[in-house]
Image (tube, rainbow, N blue to C red):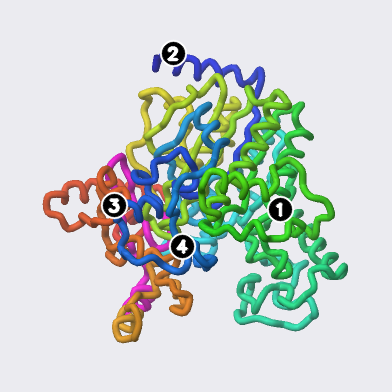
Amino acid sequence: MKNMLMTGLAMGMSACAAEKPNIVLMYVDDLDFDQVSIYDTDSFPSYTGAQRTGNLASKNLITANQNGRFLKTGEMSWHKNPTMLTPNVARLAKEGVVLDRFYLTTSVCTPSRYSLLTGRYASRSPRLLSENPPGTVPLLGWNSHMDSGENNLAKDLKAAGYKTGLVGKWHLNDYDIPEIDFASGYDGHHVRNGTGKGLRPFQLVGSYFLPTADYGDPAVQKEVGRIYDVMQKRVQRISGFDVVDRLYYANYGELPIPRHMKAHNLEWLTEGALNFIDDNKDEPFFLYFSITAPHGQYFADWMERDWRVTPAGMLTEKPKGMPSRESVLQRIQAAGLPPQNTMATWIDDSLGALLKKLDETGLAENTIVLFLSDHQSRGKLTVHEGHRAPGVIRWPGQIQPATREGRIISNIDMLPSLLAAVGSVPPADAVVDGRNFFPILGNEGDWRDHLLLETSYSRAIVSKDWKYIAHRPPQEVLDKMEADRIASEQADGDGRRHVGWSGRYTNPASGLGVRFNADQDFPAYFDADQLYNLADDVFEQRNLYTNPELQSKVKELKQQMDAELKKLPHAFGEFGEKL
């Protein structure tokens, strides 16, 4: 059977020149394993699994969710009932392959998207390198911006004869935009609590438009539309996509729009994706459908947001293509599930609309559909298993249905894999860190046995059963962490520390410890070196680094980290030293 699968795949890929497959890549924001119905939450790293199995660094429930957004009364920071109503994700899994070890090379939005679209580690970003040349210690976070001179999936597929479209969230560039004065409010008053080039909306008091701005005012809406047009043109110029539609330049909370216009609008995004498919159904197309949800999961008040609000202005007609928001709640209630589980079903409805459109247009059999998360929320901004997230791929006739893949596949593999699937390759001068994974699906083929992860001032090597973590921030961050440790011990309260390995300080008034509450999720969070046996500790609760019986494993993983970092621009502590 395996040989037959391999033969069929090879024949299909060689036949792509005759009929190139369409590609629909749905990139979901912060989707966790416990938000879809196809993973066992007790054996995959998730908040719910950690809570249900007793694998929490803190046994106390917190009042804010892991992204720092406070919950509504009666909601939990984990799924008390983890049953998810996601029939379309389940359908995709039945018709394709579920990725059990899908890893993002970085566990926050911007670098995850950079690596997805370029096939490269985010530490190669020209913008990051210009600010952090080799010899420095880069803080790898939301600073790996895309440059207009870089090759990426959109440009490479366009060169292969594809019509390319981006619908949704970009989050790959900064706010140094001359046409937009981010340092002043709508009424002309300068309101800032930060200074310097690149001032971003979330550094302002309120937002670009003061919170009191009337978002129904035609003058305000005119300016919203102008700013949207500027951002849309900028993304199109940098990215190379033929079409950029229904754009969220970044997270909606950061956008320079009135406060009451900041919300998810998945119906609006989905309608844009459906329009792109309709408009391009007669030629090969690549749709990058990058949604903003859930990004702040475990809450239900999204249904109460105004359906008219978008970053481009106020809608006058409801978008078409998805079931109503009211029906989401009705279905959840009929299934006996809590309202906080509605977000997953809302996202599932969006996927369902895409699948339905492909069926109706007769394109389903010749379209690769990828449903991927950009990272999890648990372990975000760390090198813990927030790097590991849900993933499903369907390619009729090429991928055996209802299968699972347990080998390590990464976002850096998407560019070389999808180019190979359409009979193309990256430009000869392009640096690509990923590999084509399609030949191994359902086969024993040669594949990697480990992967380097990079986030913040931390790096990790993950293999089939093991993970080694190293934190090596610059001395000023270590000094800041030590001062915070002493202050936390001396202060009244819960004694929690508020400066993590990124060097970021979290205000204690928020109810959080370090950023995204990682200190509550991982008991050895503050250990500079960590070793985990993921085969029996998927929640990373028992640091085995000092176990004398495992020092040969530590040495092996350190050697792998050193070898991988030697390929990248920056050394990291004692690893990857450049000659």
Check whether the beta carbons of the residues at disc 4 and disc 3 lie within 8 A of each other. Answer: no
User: Which corner quadrant holds the C terminus?
Assistant: bottom left
In the rendered image, which residue does mark 4 sit on?
66
Q: What element does badge 3 sit on?
A: strand
Amino acid type at image mark 4: Gln
Is residue 433 among what the camera can see? no
Amino acid type at image mark 1: Leu
- The residue at the point 50 percent across, 44 percent down is 84
**Local crowd at mark 4 within 10 Å, few (<14), some, or many (≥20)?**
many
* Label 2 vs 1, first from the N-terminus: 2
* Label 4 vs 2, first from the N-terminus: 2
- The residue at the point 33 percent across, 62 percent down is 471
Q: What element does badge 4 sit on?
A: loop
- The residue at the point 36 percent across, 24 percent down is 444
In the rendered image, which residue does mark 3 sit on?
468
Q: What element does badge 1 sit on?
A: strand
Is residue 175 among what the camera can see? yes
- State the separation of the CA atoms marked 4 and 2: 45 Å
4 vs 2, front mark: 4
- State the separation of the CA atoms marked 1 and 4: 26 Å
User: Which corner quadrant holds the N terminus?
Assistant: top left
Q: Which residues are magenta?
A: 454-482
- Which residue is more in the foreground, 356 or 140? 356
Relative to 526, residue 535 above or below: above
Relative to 220, residue 325 above or below: above
In the rendered image, which residue does mark 2 sit on?
4
Check whether the beta carbons of the residues at disc 1 and disc 4 lie within 8 A of each other. Answer: no
4 vs 3, front mark: 4
Check whether the beta carbons of the residues at disc 3 and disc 1 lie within 8 A of each other. Answer: no
